[in-house]
Image (spheres, coloured by chain):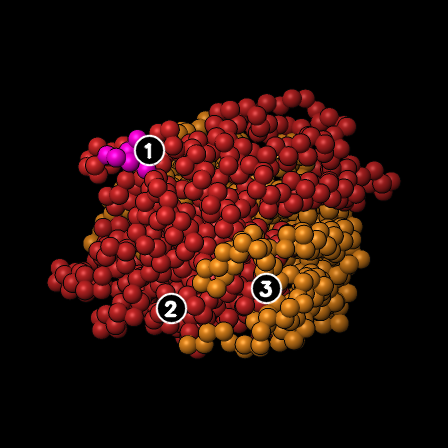
Chain colours: A red, B orange
Amino acid sequence: MSGHPDRDGPLDGDTHQREMVPSKRSAVLVDGVILNGPTTDARAGEKFVEDACRLIMEEVVLKATDVSEKVCEWRPPEQLKQLLDLEMRDTGEPHHRLLELCQDVIRYSVKTNHPRFFNQLYAGLDYYSLVARFMTEALNPSVYTYEVSPVFLLVEEAVLKKMIEFIGWKEGDGIFNPGGSVSNMYAMNLARYKYCPDIKEKGLSGLPRLILFTSAECHYSMKKAASFLGIGTENVCFVETDGRGKMIPAELEKQIWQASKEGAAPFLVCATSGTTVLGAFDPLDEIADICEKHGLWLHVDASWGGSALMSRKHRKLLHGIHRADSVAWNPHKMLMAGIQCCALLVKDKSDLLKKCYSAKASYLFQQDKFYDVSYDTGDKSIQCSRRPDAFKFWMTWKALGTLGLEERVNRALALSRYLVEEIKKREGFKLLLEPEYANICFWYIPPSLREMEEGPEFWAKLNLVAPAIKERMMKKGSLMLGYQPHRGKVNFFRQVVISPQVSREDMDFLLDEIDLLGRDM
Amino acid sequence: MSGHPDRDGPLDGDTHQREMVPSKRSAVLVDGVILNGPTTDARAGEKFVEDACRLIMEEVVLKATDVSEKVCEWRPPEQLKQLLDLEMRDTGEPHHRLLELCQDVIRYSVKTNHPRFFNQLYAGLDYYSLVARFMTEALNPSVYTYEVSPVFLLVEEAVLKKMIEFIGWKEGDGIFNPGGSVSNMYAMNLARYKYCPDIKEKGLSGLPRLILFTSAECHYSMKKAASFLGIGTENVCFVETDGRGKMIPAELEKQIWQASKEGAAPFLVCATSGTTVLGAFDPLDEIADICEKHGLWLHVDASWGGSALMSRKHRKLLHGIHRADSVAWNPHKMLMAGIQCCALLVKDKSDLLKKCYSAKASYLFQQDKFYDVSYDTGDKSIQCSRRPDAFKFWMTWKALGTLGLEERVNRALALSRYLVEEIKKREGFKLLLEPEYANICFWYIPPSLREMEEGPEFWAKLNLVAPAIKERMMKKGSLMLGYQPHRGKVNFFRQVVISPQVSREDMDFLLDEIDLLGRDM
């Protein structure tokens, strides 16, 4: 067994951050270790934190809004490994060397805060959530019991309550999870528990085949969840969508009948509000009707689209969401709370989350505590230690107010609308479909293909364009946006608008730049 | 449906952080939104971040090592709600008000960095991981693809490789998860996949009852995992432990035979290295023999005890761990990487993690990218967005070196040893059992009970002592440690030593303080 590999001699005495050896006179020695006094050189540590904070401020925060900075400083994996000193050794590095390392990490990291980072469903820098996040890291809490996380548990309660109001429920319950995928899993498990509480103890063995329904455009986490929960990916029934990517209710009902006829046990319908690629919203009201009729749990994956609830103008996209049994909603996306901030909201108020998830650990959830232990909400979670993700959203909400959040959503969708109209106007750009949200899917057709007939050869050639432009933009570092093939459509770009640091000028730049990078193809 | 509840009039113009309304002459207006220029007042935002960083530095970082500060400023839930202004309103708050809120959040939060916070399996302030955490928050990455997280993916790879060396495997694979509970779930699912890969698609319905074995002292996440994965809590077979909390191998084998005889399908043994309450280490070598003989996956939950691997003196506690198929190990505990930092390590090198977890989302994991897509490791995870938790551990490791980490472990265990000897010497203190790790479990017996016979009345009265002392210590704010009843033993204290800021003097203080708080009982 390799104990300490690469042992390279005794600890070098002059590294600055070496933990101090106490040398008090009344030294107490146990197992060769002097136990008097703390060993950390606090002053040196504090100085290091101060220096690093200055670096972070200068290199990340102050540059976040500067479009003249590169979005990324691309290096291929093998080269980046050589540039970075990744190796962990027997002896530590001095502070000045660590600061250089920090600088390298920043330099070669993708600037997801940059106004021209459009690659994912998150982007931009929110100063308020950032402060909350710094506080969280400094305070290092874990939210399971009130005794260790009094403030963060109350904040989580307040935020959940407010989100529940925006869904349109009178009351409800909820929990923040490490990702929308995890929230979807929670919902699937809750629906299963509601369908048959015995599964918690007995498991699925010997039961009829449970089956769930979701749209063909849903997030891939539904499959991951079905597999993880022992339901099986084949028991995820994908319901066909219309030309805009919305679930067709009649198809859903047909599939439910079919599954029941085959002896399977339908227990859940998952609708999507804001699909990942197309940004489509399933018709919740009609789906809710079907769920009611068949007695099925309705979960809405609004991880991406939920933020539209903040806008009086756009919340109609989620019309009917108040009829859902559970909702996943990630404020770390359009509301910029920072990765991760993901709520699962549940309409039930019979303490279903706790009943479904509790394991009643006696070392954490003692019932003879001196305060109201209903505030010890950790047993609603599959996690033990859990981060206070609600806090960063709360801070932004406090800073901007509901109206400020609404303005963000309205602006992102107005910018999307602007981009769509520009795409329509410009030669060589072709919309995949008229978007209803902030996902703008389009092809760039380089000059050499513009006269070609839209046959197999055209599509085969077009399929190569987006990856090639993506490579060029990454190497140049001028912007980042994603591309993908999708359900028979060859590779196209998906532009997502989120950040309030983004302007019309950035939309124009995006189209100009793609044209610049691809016009010789 | 309540849209914007508590609407309180139009946005007040003089809040400092209101996002700016651009007023360029060539204004482009879409849907009533002016799209020119960014709307964020970056200068004001940056100033706010700077001010908040100063506050965090002064109120959290600089005070972290000061034992004259209180560990907590206790307020009961209803009172704390009144003290904090939790309500989110339509309009935002000005910066000076937000800074006051930050101050309140810090004031009423438990100081888990404090040298006298002994309440959980994490504690203390590590300056290096803290810097890494600040960087993470500022850069806001998500580790799924190399294109958006080049540095953090390479760091994760390097850290996993090093941890694998310390386990004693020649090679392996792994992933960082949001908690040891989640790592345990991953392992259970991997073992199940290995046992029968079809379950991923087909689910458990109709299969024989899968059954797993773990010690009666294991973490409660095993039950949560079995329930979540559709296996059922009744199919977690709890193997009896000896007087020190270690699994009895003969009992394990007996249970495996028994389960097979009953037609259940054994697939997994979970051993624990460092149990939550007693800090016990299961005999891995003997358990591995049994697993080999029966063809069962061996998972070791070393979430807490794994850090002992860093110490040449103490790694023998995990003797045999190299024979495990998977290991959960949380550097956020004794190695102080900050919540959360939790690795699942897997011995298999046939890409089992990817096979078991992949869903091959085409919008993230395109196969026609211009770089080596084997670096896109996101499909090994049940999460989609995922935090770069390896990075903070890497930074501490770079700063202290392996020898510095070893010193931390050695010191924590030497301090534990010192405390044990003090408990033995002092009147009114009684060890529950001789510890082998950093969990020191003991009763404080107040003067009124010292002459009483150890009968039912004695235990009933003693059971009330720890909760009562805990209440007093929280209200005083002088220290925090946990208590619990455990397997027939009435409420006792569990002292956990982790932080290098802790000294012999803190151990003495702990016992003096408990005696001070409880001597009139």
- Residue at 67%, 67% (x, y): give it: B14
With respect to residue A12, does A218 lie above or below? below
Q: Nearer the viewer, residue A230 or A239?
A: A239
Secondary structure of the residue carrying tag 2 is helix
Q: Amino acid at mark 2?
A: Lys
Can see residue B317? no
Where does label 3 land, which residue?
Answer: A400
Instruction: Give the mark nearest the N terminus, 1 or 3.
Output: 3
Q: Nearer the viewer, residue A207 or B416?
A: A207
Are the residues under badges 1 and 3 in a single subunit? yes
Q: In x, y percent, where is residue B462?
A: 63, 68
Residue B67 magenta-highlighted: no
- Residue at 34%, 45% (x, y): give it: A442
Q: Amino acid at mark 3?
A: Leu
With respect to residue A30, does B72 lie above or below? below
Q: CA distance from mark 2 to mark 3?
A: 23 Å
Residue A449 magenta-highlighted: yes
Are the residues under badges 2 and 3 in a single subunit? yes
- Residue at 35%, 49% (x, y): give it: A424
Query: Which chain does tag 2 point to?
Result: A
Splitting the image into 4 quarters, where does residue A48 fall? top right
Q: In x, y percent, where is residue B426?
A: 75, 56
Where does label 1 land, which residue?
Answer: A447
Which label was assigned to residue A316? Answer: 2
Query: Which chain does tag 1 point to?
Result: A
Q: Nearer the viewer, mark 2 or mark 1?
A: 1
> In the rendered structure, which segment of residues is drawn in magenta?
A445-452
Other residues around mark 3 within 10 Å, as few (<14) / some (14–19) / many (≥20): many
Q: Amino acid at mark 1?
A: Pro
Q: Residue furthest right?
A: A25
Other residues around mark 2 within 10 Å, as few (<14) / some (14–19) / many (≥20): few
